Amino acid sequence: MAVPSPCSLSHLPLCSNPLTQQQKNRLLLTRSCNSRFKCSAGQTGFFTRLGRLIKEKARSDVEKIFSGFSKTRDNLAVVDELLLYWNLADTDRVLDELEEALLVSDFGPKITIKIVESLRDDILAGKLKSGSEIKAALKKSVLDLLTKKGSKTELKLGFRKPAVVMVVGVNGGGKTTSLGKLANRLKNEGAKVLLAAGDTFRAAASDQLEIWAERTGCEIVVAEGEKAKASTVLSQAVRRGKEQGYDIVLCDTSGRLHTNYSLMEELIACKKAVGKVVSGAPNASLTLCLEILQVLDGTTGLNMLPQAREFNDVVGITGLILTKLDGSARGGCVVSVVDELGIPVKFVGVGEGVEDLQPFDAEAFVNAIFP
């Protein structure tokens, strides 16, 4: 497989042809039995307690979520204005303007129509008789969409140590920064964390992750040579994690366009290499419980959907990290991505601070955009 030079990724075309069906089939064959294997966290033990602590911390940090979605909330402030003096005769006008507000916030046409038509039916049936009742029904509709397909928002870390989390995504989405912030959160909750600098293409990536390792007090494994393969670095890290009793290994990977076949194929190699070390079995796809988190740039709104679909088809995404949402008024994309893909959002980036990678809580999100 041809490997691009460290600097060549910056010259990749911004738009290229999507993977052909034949290429997808080859990658899916490489995945073999992954679709039949389901990861599940242990019911007791360290990882269960860790997951519970993270979720409890998220509920106590609702103010960060609230402030992080301020631009989306400002976009949707018109909802309260529309419903304040609502009466039955204004139903069509109010719902048309509500539809426009949801679309502007990137809820997407499919979700928006589903929500608005449901409200219309309930209003005409006499089930909703006031503006406050309509707003409550709106919030419930959004919450139901998030919890129906994306309810499992906690990290699934399995039942054996070390748990392995691999972070993937396109260039510039904030993978390395998100991984560093995640390391900080896990370390603060008592986990022994090892970082793996699997981005072997971007020259500054290892240096950036080393800064995060020093900042968070974590150890790090980096490439031993200029031409080291990412899969080798990650397998070495997981082996060290296994031998030295680490709780969690966080694996960084190179940014890649979802349309670049050879680089997407490399992710498969990384996943297989990690699996062999964790399981000790040659057919790792049957025994590995691996959390694969895709980082998506929240400022791109609905444009993130094609990326997420391709990565999921190829490597099997188990959760999403949506970044830069504090700088975007397009927070409705959270609902669209969960509904379209059925992949839970596990963390959201709501600021530049080290504590601003927040575990996703659907109810807190809904209350933040519709206070």
Image (spheres, grey):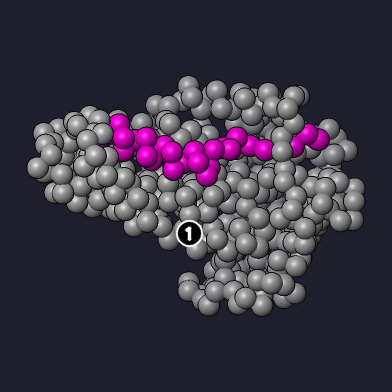
Residue designated by label 1: 305
Quadrant of the rendered image containing residue 57: top right
Residue at point 60%, 31% (across, down): 185
In the rendered view, does 117 fall on the left or right side of 15?
left
Q: Can residue 125 be seen in the rendering of this structure?
A: yes
Most foreground residue, 286 or 86: 86
Residue pictured at 48% horizontal, 33% vertical: 361
Q: Is residue 219 left or right of residue 294?
A: right
- Considering the numbered disc 1 on the image, is that residue within a helix, a strand or a loop? helix
**Amino acid found under the numbered disc labelled 1:** Leu
Q: Is the C terminus in the top left, top right, bottom left or bottom right quadrant?
A: top left
Which of the 4 image quadrants contains residue 157?
Answer: top right
Q: Position of residue 95 (x, y in %)?
A: 20, 47
Q: Position of residue 240 (x, y in %)?
A: 84, 42
29 vs 356: above or below: below
Q: Which residues are magenta?
A: 134-161
Indicate yes or no whether the magenta region holds residue 148. Answer: yes
Q: Is residue 125 magenta?
A: no
Residue plotted at (18% across, 31% down): 130
Q: Is residue 16 above or below residue 34?
A: below
**Residue 273: where, in percent of width, then height?**
81, 56
